[in-house]
Image: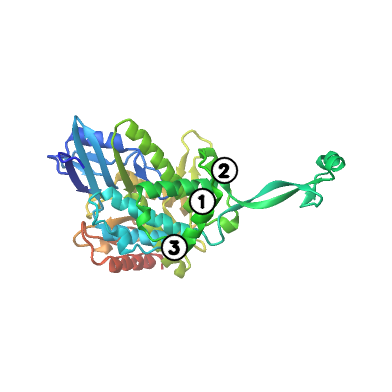
C-alpha cells in the first residue's frame, strides 16, 4: 500500500474519527463502494435506508453503517483506506457464520497475521465457507440432467427414429435411434468453475485445505468444462433442481453472487473508483437468529415458516409483508423481526418505522391465529438489562390483545465478548418462556 495513504478505522454502527473521516471523504467512500457489498443469500439486498456511513444530526458525528469490510480509493489526489470491523469482535462474527453454515472455522482459515488487509481476511473466510458448502452439497454428486443423444449403427439404443432410419438403412445398413444420457448440468458446472477461478485469484482459496468431497466435485467440473462460457442472468434463474439436488441451490446462489461481485469490481476499477469488499452484518444477524431459533424451538413443537403476504392486494398501494422470523405450533404463531442496530435501552434506539412494522406483521396474523408472542430482536449492549421492563403481556395497551410483546435479543458487549454461549442460551430460554 502507498505510504501516504490515510487509514480510517471504525466499528460497525459506531462513530468515525471525525478529524480524518470528513464529510467529503465519506461521501466519496459511499459513492465508490455502493456496489461492493457481498450477500450470502441471493434474495438479500440492501434496503434504501441503510448506508455504508451516515451523519447523526443529534450527536453531530459520522457513524459507520451496518457493514464490515475495507475499501481503498482516491479522493482529491489523496489515497484513503477505510476499515470497518464488527463491533462485537471478530470471534462473534465467526460464531454466527459457523451457526449459519454449520461449519467450524479453523484457526488457519481465520488467521490474518500475514496481511493487514481486513477485506482479505473476510474474503478468506468466505472462501472457506464456499468450500464447506460445496462439500455439504455434494451428497449425491453434481446436478445432472437428461440430454437427448443420437445413435447410428446396426443396433438400437433407446427408441428407433423411424423417419431418420429409412434412407440411411438402405444406403449404409444403419439405423438411427435416440436415447437419453445423464450429464452434469452445464450451467451449474460453468457457475461453479468460474466462481472457483475467482476464489483462487482473489480469495486465497489455495491456502485452505479442501475436503475430499469438495475436491471430487471440482475435479468433475474441471474435466467436464472445456472452456468458460458466459452464463446469463436468465440462464441462472432458469436452473431447475430435482429434489435429490436441492442442496445445491444455496451453493450455486453463493457462487453466482461471487461472479457478479467480481464483474462489478472490474467495472469499478476501470472507472478508477477504487475497490473494496463488505458484508452486511444485518443479513448475518438475521440468518444467525433464524438458525439458532429453528434448532431450539423445534424441540418445543414450534416450526419455522417463511411467509410472504400482500396487504391490499389489487390496489396501487399494496405492500408486501415479509416478517424475518415466523414460527407456528398448531394454531399458535409467533412473529419476530431481527434488527442489527445499537440497543442501549433508550427510547431513541427503537426506530419508529421498525416499531410500526412489527405491529403490522402481528396484526396481520391476529384474525387467523392465536399470536402467542412477537417483537424486535437486537444485539443488546445496555450495561444492565432488566428484561421484565423489555416486554409486556399485551399489544399496545392493557385493553389490547393478550400476547407477549417484547424487545429482546442477545446481550453483547461492544468490541469484546467472552460469554457469548451463555448469553445466547439465556436469550433462547427467554423466548421459550414467552411461548410457553
Q: In which quarter of the image is the N terminus?
A: top left
State which mark lies toward you, 1 or 3: 1
Residues at marks 2 and 3 touching, judged by CB atoms closer than 8 Å: no
Residue at 80% of width from left, 51% of height from top? 156
205 lies left or right of 82: right
- Could you say whether the residue bearing mark 3 is in a helix, strand or loop? loop
Give the camera-side residue of 336 and 10. 10
Q: Name the residue under label 3.
A: 211
Residue at 23% of width from left, 46% of height from top? 83
Residues at marks 2 and 1 touching, judged by CB atoms closer than 8 Å: no
Q: Position of residue 50 (x, y in %)?
A: 31, 42
Mark 1 Cα within 10 Å, few/some/many (few <14, many 20+)?
some
Q: Residue furthest right?
A: 170
Q: Can residue 12 be seen in this view?
A: no
Measure the alpha-carbon separation of dots 1 and 3. 16 Å
Mark 3 Cα within 10 Å, few/some/many (few <14, many 20+)?
few
State which mark lies toward you, 2 or 1: 1
Residue at 73% of width from left, 50% of height from top? 179
Of callouts 2 and 1, the N-terminal one: 1
Give the camera-side residue of 364 and 432. 432
Of callouts 2 and 3, the N-terminal one: 3
* Number of marks: 3
Q: Position of residue 372 (x, y in %)?
A: 42, 61
Q: Position of residue 415 (x, y in %)?
A: 21, 57
The disc placed on residue 222 is: 1
Q: Name the residue under label 2.
A: 238
Measure the alpha-carbon separation of dots 2 and 3. 30 Å
The disc placed on residue 42 is: none
Q: Where is residue 408 in the image (x, y as percent from the top left)?
A: 31, 59
Colouring convention used in this rendered image of the protein: rainbow
Give the camera-side residue of 428 and 94. 94
Amino acid at each position: 500500500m502507498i505510504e501516504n495513504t490515510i487509514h480510517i478505522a471504525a466499528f460497525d454502527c459506531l462513530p468515525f474519527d471525525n478529524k480524518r473521516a470528513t464529510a467529503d471523504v465519506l461521501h466519496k467512500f459511499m459513492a465508490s463502494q455502493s456496489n461492493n457489498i457481498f450477500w450470502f443469500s441471493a434474495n438479500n439486498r440492501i434496503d434504501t435506508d441503510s448506508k455504508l456511513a451516515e451523519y447523526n444530526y443529534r450527536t453531530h458525528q459520522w457513524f459507520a453503517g451496518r457493514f464490515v469490510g475495507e475499501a481503498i480509493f482516491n479522493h482529491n489526489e489523496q489515497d484513503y483506506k477505510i476499515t470497518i470491523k464488527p463491533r462485537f469482535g471478530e470471534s462473534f462474527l465467526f460464531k454466527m457464520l459457523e451457526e449459519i453454515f454449520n461449519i467450524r472455522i479453523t484457526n488457519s482459515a481465520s488467521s490474518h497475521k500475514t496481511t493487514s488487509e481486513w477485506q482479505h481476511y473476510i474474503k478468506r473466510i468466505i472462501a472457506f465457507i464456499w468450500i464447506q458448502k460445496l462439500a455439504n452439497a455434494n451428497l449425491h454428486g453434481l446436478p445432472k440432467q437428461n440430454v437427448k443423444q443420437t445413435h447410428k449403427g446396426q443396433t438400437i439404443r433407446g427408441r428407433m427414429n423411424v423417419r431418420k432410419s429409412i434412407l440411411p438403412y438402405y444406403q449404409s445398413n444403419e439405423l438411427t435411434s435416440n436415447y437419453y444420457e445423464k450429464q452434469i448440468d452445464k450451467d451449474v458446472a460453468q457457475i461453479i468453475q468460474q466462481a472457483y477461478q475467482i476464489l483462487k485469484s482473489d480469495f486465497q482459496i489455495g491456502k485452505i485445505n479442501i475436503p475430499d468431497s469438495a475436491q471430487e466435485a471440482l475435479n468433475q467440473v474441471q474435466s467436464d468444462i472445456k472452456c468458460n462460457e458466459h452464463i446469463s442472468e436468465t440462464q441462472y434463474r432458469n436452473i431447475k433442481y430435482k429434489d435429490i439436488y436441492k442442496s445445491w441451490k444455496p451453493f450455486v446462489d453463493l457462487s453466482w453472487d461471487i461472479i457478479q461481485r467480481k464483474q462489478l469490481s472490474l467495472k469499478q476499477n476501470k472507472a478508477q473508483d477504487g475497490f473494496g469488499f463488505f458484508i452486511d452484518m444485518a443479513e448475518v444477524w438475521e440468518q444467525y437468529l433464524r438458525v439458532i431459533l429453528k434448532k431450539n424451538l423445534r424441540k418445543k413443537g414450534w416450526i419455522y415458516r417463511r411467509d410472504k403476504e400482500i396487504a391490499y392486494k389489487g390496489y396501487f398501494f399494496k405492500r408486501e409483508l415479509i416478517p424475518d422470523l415466523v414460527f407456528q405450533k398448531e394454531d399458535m404463531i409467533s412473529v419476530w423481526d431481527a434488527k442489527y442496530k445499537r440497543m442501549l435501552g433508550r427510547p431513541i434506539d427503537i426506530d419508529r418505522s421498525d416499531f410500526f412494522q412489527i405491529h403490522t406483521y402481528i396484526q396481520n396474523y391476529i384474525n387467523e391465529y392465536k399470536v402467542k408472542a412477537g417483537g424486535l430482536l437486537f444485539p443488546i449492549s445496555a450495561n444492565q438489562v432488566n428484561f421484565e421492563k423489555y416486554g409486556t403481556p399485551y399489544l399496545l395497551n392493557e385493553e389490547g390483545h393478550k400476547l407477549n410483546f417484547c424487545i429482546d435479543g442477545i446481550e453483547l458487549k461492544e468490541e469484546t465478548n467472552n460469554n457469548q454461549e451463555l448469553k445466547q442460551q439465556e436469550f433462547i430460554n427467554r423466548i421459550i418462556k414467552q411461548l410457553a
